[in-house]
Image (cartoon, rainbow, N blue to C red):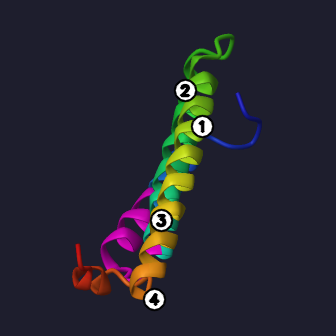
């Protein structure tokens, strides 16, 4: 267990991070900000996996393994999303969500 910090405090923090990410995903108009919001959501879930595993099964590492897997998938997702955003910027010279409807196929 983590000394001085209860699981409720950590889960409250990750819940706040998760909902900040949800709020940013639905309210931001910039594609980079939307990507950052998705990363907040994923980081909140990684912290939940690790903390719940640490408190329930302190001798096992499944939560950390899931966390590393999610971080690897998030890194690949970020690299792909940045490539798509750069390609969109080259075509329409904007990274706003509303401007993506003006794409010519």
Circle 1 Cα neighbour tier, 10 Å, few/some/many (<14 / 14–19 / ≥20) = few
In this picture, is 6 found above or below 90?
A: above
Which of discs 4 and 2 lies nearer the camera? The answer is 4
Sooner in the amino-acid sequence: mark 2 or mark 3: 3
- Check if mark 4's residue and mark 2's residue have beta carbons within 8 Å: no
Please state, as top left, top right, bottom left or bottom right, where the C terminus lies in the image. bottom left
Is residue 100 shown left or right of residue 16? Answer: left
The image's mark for residue 35 is 3
Which of discs 2 and 3 lies nearer the camera? The answer is 3
Which residue is rendered at x = 69% and y = 11% of the image?
A: 59
Circle 3 Cα neighbour tier, 10 Å, few/some/many (<14 / 14–19 / ≥20) = many
Residue at image mark 2: 66
Q: Is residue 42 magenta?
A: no
Circle 4 Cα neighbour tier, 10 Å, few/some/many (<14 / 14–19 / ≥20) = few
Residue 5: x and y, percent?
69, 43
Mark 1 element type: helix
Is residue 37 shown left or right of residue 4? Answer: left
Sooner in the amino-acid sequence: mark 1 or mark 2: 2
Which residues fall within the magenta stretch? Answer: 18-31
Which residue is rendered at x = 37% and y = 69% of the image?
A: 25
The image's mark for residue 72 is 1
Sooner in the amino-acid sequence: mark 4 or mark 2: 2
């Amino acid at each position: 267990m983590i000394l001085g910090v209860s699981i409720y405090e950590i889960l409250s923090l990750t819940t706040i991070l998760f909902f900040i990410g949800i709020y940013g995903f639905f309210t931001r108009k910039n594609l980079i900000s939307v990507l950052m919001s998705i990363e907040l959501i994923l980081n909140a879930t990684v912290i939940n996996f690790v903390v719940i595993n640490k408190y329930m099964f302190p001798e096992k590492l499944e939560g950390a393994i899931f966390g590393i897997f999610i971080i690897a998938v998030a890194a690949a997702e970020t690299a792909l999303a940045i490539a798509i955003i750069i390609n969109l910027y080259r075509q329409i010279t904007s990274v706003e969500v509303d401007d993506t409807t003006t794409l010519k196929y």
